[in-house]
Amino acid sequence: MLSHNQIKYINSLKIKKYRYQHNAFFVEGEKGVAELLKSTLHIVKVFALREWIDANYSLLENRKTEIQEITPDELKKVSDLLSPNLVIAVADIPMQELPDISGFNSMMLALDGIRDPGNMGTIIRTADWFGINKIVCSSDSVDVYNPKVVQATMGSFSRVEVFYVDLLEFFSRLPSTIPVFGALLDGPDISEKSFRKKGIILIGSESHGISEKLVPFVNEPVYIPHFMANTSANYAESLNASIANGIICYEICKQLYKNII
């Protein structure tokens, strides 16, 4: 049975201020919790319906995680979903150190002002798909431990490290030899550009794109063209940030993979 204090505590984790006050976040749903249990993140406690506990006994036994059985009505009191799932887990927010970029030799994402939880979660999930396990975000980007972000990652939050930094300072300290890819209107068609070196993909905000102060750091601009039979026809002003990220990640990673093998 969930106590009043437990209900209050779990619900408080829906608010950023209290997540960092308690240094904890919660994960809801079978997929997310299963990925959490497979990860190295420290799990405080799992709250689940009996049917989920019975179905996941081996997974729980491997982690030796503390678990508390709850009822459907109790789950509704703490769920962040319109249709509550079967399980919620509370985990510690991990301590992270920004990796050394002096000897940088991998792919990384940089997110400039991504405020929509769904976009952030999808970008993290896409990064995971393409083997990109580190993301740096501007301080005004949505919190990765926001429940809606965690839900949208479909478990990828457990494999992708996200850091919040001053992006201007970050890029100012970045060696000029590291490619910084960014979608700009005056960039070359991404499908016609050759990519042979790993670097950082900079994705701008949903409303304004890449900040003017960061544009000078984009030394490998790209452009995602639209395809219209009649160029005078109306078309969307811009692509969704997570969609643009997916296209850029695909084209760059595809070429880099071919070049490696």
Image (cartoon, helix red, strand yellow):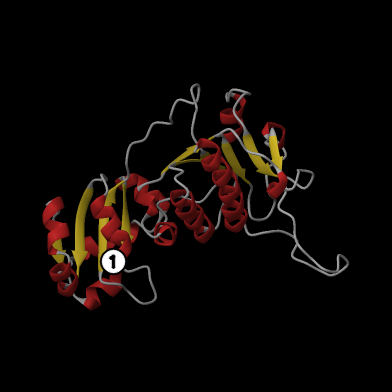
Q: Residue furthest front?
A: 261
Residue 82 is left or right of residue 180, and the answer is left
- Identify which residue, 212 or 129, lies in the foreground: 129
- Identify which residue, 73 or 102, lies in the foreground: 102
Q: Residue furthest right?
A: 232
Residue 133 x/y as whole percent: 43, 42
Residue 62 x/y as whole percent: 13, 52
Residue 259 x/y as whole percent: 55, 37
Residue 257 is left or right of residue 203, and the answer is left
Residue 74 visible to an observer of this rendering: yes
Of the 4 image quadrants, the one containing the N terminus is bottom left
Residue 138 visible to an observer of this rendering: no
Look at mark 1 in the image and give the residue it sits on: 30
Q: Is disc 1 surrounded by few (<14), some (14 to 19) or many (20+) residues within 10 Å?
A: some
Q: Is residue 108 above or below residue 84?
A: above
Label 1 secondary element: helix
Residue drawn at (12%, 63%) of the image:
57
* Amino acid type of the residue tagged 1 in the rendering: Glu
Q: Is residue 189 above or below residue 242?
A: above
Residue drawn at (20%, 67%) of the image:
48
- Identify which residue, 244 or 1, lies in the foreground: 244
Residue 13 x/y as whole percent: 34, 56
Q: Is residue 54 above or below residue 13?
A: below
Residue 155 is left or right of residue 123, and the answer is left
Residue drawn at (28%, 66%) of the image:
30
Name the image quarter holding residue 138: top right
Count of labels in the image: 1
